[in-house]
Amino acid sequence: MNVENVGEIRALVLDDNTFARKFAVRALTSAGVAAVVEAASGSEAISILSRATNAVHLIFCDLLMPDMDGVEFVRHAATLAIVPTFVFVSGADQALLNTAEDMARARGLEVLGSIQKPISVDAVRRILTKLHDAAPQSHDAGRASITPAHIEDALNKKQILLHFQPKVSLTDGALVGFEALARWQHPDFGLIPPGAFITLAEESGQIAALTDYLAVLAMEQCAAWNHVGLHAKISVNLSAYMLVDLDLPDRMEMTTRRVDIRPGQIVLEITESGLFRDAATALDILARLHMKGFPLSIDDFGTGYSSMEQLRRVPFSEMKIDRAFVRGAAESSRARMILKSSADLGRNLGMSVVAEGAETIEDWKTLGDTGVDIVQGYFVAKPMAVEQVESWWRRVGDRRLGLA
């Protein structure tokens, strides 16, 4: 969404109910939205969105409408040349809203979240606070034609860097560690998010070089923080494509010795859905990493198809529950039960349980009732450049966050 603040947003309210539509318009206007247009049907909304002038940035879409319901509307809207960011609105249960969000994202659309009817000004404001988090930091980066040669050049010129997102204890808000997240500081396109280049690196065979580069950066940063008294674990994403490299455990151990940190300070997050392309080799590598002292974390738990089998075969010490199971758990008893069952499983297997994607105080409180140990998400802190981390830590990290 190419806007800098709420006052620049042009929004569309799609609802077949006249009263609900007018009520929503008033709520958006009171929340500071610059301009709001209305549509009483999906076909009318498609017509508005198809116009070349006065582009709509944000659409508040009702789900339960006659003729063309909100789900059908998303299907048609996804084929348009320019599609606004979605917010779903309904008087239906939260489970349906969550399904609509996931469906829209699966169609490649940007979704800020959902609101239960009736729309309130506070609910709109809470949604609008996510604008900068959802918007890419460089819109040109999304249009850039990135090639393997660009990635190789970025590595050679050290343009790939790390941002760090804090992980804190749910019990007392104490800082536990950070997740290291890749960013590409491109001289022309600005800060490029990982989604724009990680998959290409995997497909082009460059993921090994990229992973090694990022792991070394994380270990060196860990050592630098140790020297200033910031003793925290750093989680590094380990691509499943790396689980064919039998030299990886020795290489990782050698780097920890070189920079003078303990292997236990580097948590290796392995995405659950892609663990075993070559089961024998992957298990060989993971077993040796574990023996050398590197904690293993099963990332995005619950999003793959063989979760239980992975837990049986791999000596994981941490379970990281995917944000999809955190979102909506405060409102949905079913989502809450899934979250609690996952946390119970992890704890019963002797693992630390991390929940990612906590965005609100409601998320934090809900996680407190489910047995989760560690929380990560925008409610705690956004990912930060390395030069921001130490000041953040000195301000709040060493005195607890006051969230418990």
Image: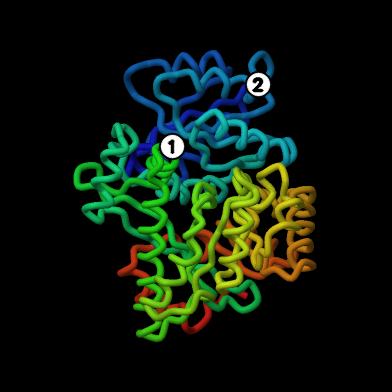
Of the two numbered discs 2 and 1 in the rendering, the one whose residue sits closer to the viewer = 1
Whole-number angstrom distance, CA of label 2 to CA of label 1: 38 Å
- Percent from the top left, x then y, of residue 177? 51, 72
**Disc 2 marks which amino acid?**
Asp
Q: In this view, does 188 lie to the left or right of 332?
A: left
- Percent from the top left, x then y, of residue 14? 55, 26
Question: Of the numbered discs in the image, which one, if any, rests on residue 203?
Answer: 1
Q: Mark 2 highlights which residue?
A: 69
Of 135 and 343, which appears nearest the observer?
Answer: 343
Q: Earlier in the sequence, mark 2 or mark 1?
A: 2
Tell me the residue at 43%/37% (across/down): 203
Q: Quadrant of the N terminus?
A: top left
Q: Can residue 135 be seen in this view?
A: no
Q: Is residue 390 left or right of residue 316?
A: left
**Disc 1 marks which amino acid?**
Glu
Q: What element carries label 2?
A: loop
Tell me the residue at 35%/76% (across/down): 391
- Marks 2/1 in contact by CB < 8 Å: the verdict is no
Q: Compared with residue 170, is residue 116 higher up or lower down, i.e. above or below?
A: above
- Percent from the top left, x then y, of residue 40? 57, 19
Of 230 and 324, which appears nearest the observer?
Answer: 230
Tell me the residue at 48%/28% (across/down): 12
